[in-house]
Each structure stands twice: as structure tokens, then as C-alpha cells.
Image: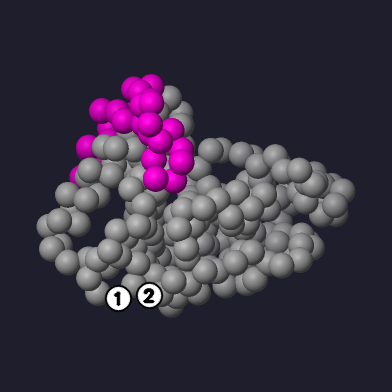
Amino acid sequence: MKIKERVTPFIGADREYSYTSAGGDTARAVDEAAQEALFAWLKEKKEYPAILSEESGLMEGKGEGILLIDPVDGSSNADRGIPFACVSVAYSLSNSLKDLEMAVLLDLFRGDLYYAIKGEGAFKNGNRVEVREFRGTPVIYAPCQGSDPVSKDRLGFKHIARRDLGSVALGLALVAEGRIDALIDLRGDLRIVDLAAGLLMVKEAGGAVLVNKHEIGGLKREFSVMAGVREVIRRVNVEGMVEL
């Protein structure tokens, strides 16, 4: 919650800088505030593993594993005061998404805290969450894509309610708690820090999770993802996707 307190004064500030983050995106005051709060907390811990942050890149640490951090996923939303953005933190034992152990997502507007622990489930504000039992019209988080895999005709649904909300991490949290049926983004344009925490959330909530690769590298935009209700995901026939 210290992160939310530090970031709140900059939400809606509409303050962009002339330089870019380590990930190549426009730097904003809200991103820097979140990063400062995160690293202040880590300093209190004295020792921590390697860190890959969207804002500052890869930093060596002590101990096993790696922390994958996006200080603000949906920073353009937060910068303009559009209420859909979060802090995303995941921990993996190795350089593989298959070894994700823990995840935390904090909704910067509502204050909801999502977290997941491998083998123990997914939770929102201390209450267990699960993916939705599929029924009716599917609600799918799906950005516009070239050869669009998410159409009602292609998937065989009479209707599809389609969304693109501006934060993949928070979108995955909504999938995990059953508000959205699936998140499908096959552009190969996502970073590992955008995905890691949300993927563990969905998996621990009982959903299907597929990615085009599972190696944790740098901040290159190279990931595609399908995550959510298995009955929806199985209708998307795409080669090269690996289930976690």
C-alpha cells in the first residue's frame, strides 16, 4: 500500500518525460513514483534476488531466482486518470515462466490486492478466486490484431463481447477472478513483465495458460498469450503456443 500512497499524487497528472524507460516506453511521473516506492521497500529487505524492471532493466541481486516488475502496467491510463492500471510483481525460481512461484498485483485505483502462490491458489483481498464457469456470451480481452483470431465466426460463438482495456496484467487478474472469460493477445508484442504475475494468477485460479515461449530474457516485446476459461481457449487454433 506504500506504493499506492506514493503513486496517488501522480495519477491523472498527465506528466510525460522526454526520455524512455529501459523497456523503450515513454517515461511518466507515475512510473517513476511507483519504481521509487518499490525500491525503497526492497532496500528495507537488504537482500533480494535479481530484478527485471520495465523502468530500469535488469539488476543483479543476491539469492536464487528473479523478480519481474512492472511498476505501473497501464501507465498511460494512470497518467490520464483512466481507472485501469496496476503494479505487477512476480517471482520465478529460474529463467522460465514454468518456475513462477509467487505473484502480486495491486489495482492502483481501487486498492484491490491480488496474489497467487504456486500450488496454493489465487486470491483477491484474502479471498480465493477462480476462473468463471463458462456460460453464455464470452467476454474476451483481445487487442486488435492483424490476422484476427478472435472473431465470433472463427471461434464459433453467436456473439462475443470484446475488450481492450490498456493493462494486460490487470486484465489477467480479472480473468482469474471470473469477470473476463479469456485474454488473448497473439501479436508477439508483450513483455515478460507485463505477463508474469497475471499468468500465475490465472493458472492458480484454475484457468488454461498458453504462451509462445517460456524463457525469461530481457524486456524485448516478444510474447503472445492465451489465458482463461479452457472452453474458450481451446477454440483458438494457433501453432507454437505452449501450455504452462
Say above or below: 74 vs 115. Answer: above
Please say whether residue 11 is one of the residues in the magenta stretch: yes
How many neighbours does mark 2 have within 10 angstroms: few (below 14), some (14-19), or many (20 or more)? Answer: some
Location of residue 98 in the rendering, given as x and y in whole percent from the top left corner: 50, 74
Which amino acid is tagged 1?
Glu
43 and 228: which is toward the camera = 43
Residue occupying the point 53% across, 38% down: 166
Please say whether residue 86 is one of the residues in the magenta stretch: no
Would you identify the image quadrant in which residue 37 lies?
top left
Indicate left or right for 207 with 193 as reference. Answer: right
Q: Quadrant of the C terminus?
A: bottom right
Marking on residue 64? 1
Residue occupying the point 33% across, 33% down: 30
Callout 1: helix, strand or loop? loop
- Whether residue 56 is visible, yes or no, is yes
- Whether residue 86 is visible, yes or no, is no
Give the magenta part as a residue range. 1-29
Residue occupying the point 29% across, 42% down: 34
Badge 1 or badge 2: first in the primary sequence: 1
Location of residue 192 in the rendering, given as x and y in whole percent from the top left corner: 49, 57
Location of residue 82 in the rendering, given as x and y in whole percent from the top left corner: 46, 28
Q: Where does label 2 land, which residue?
A: 93
Colour scheme of the rendered structure: one colour
Residue extending furthest toward the top: 14
Callout 2: helix, strand or loop? loop
Which amino acid is tagged 2?
Leu
Q: Are the residues at dot 1 and dot 2 in contact (C-beta closer than 8 Å)? A: yes
Indicate left or right for 219 with 113 as reference. Answer: right
Location of residue 117 in the rendering, given as x and y in whole percent from the top left corner: 38, 70
Marking on residue 140? none
Residue occupying the point 70% across, 40% down: 144
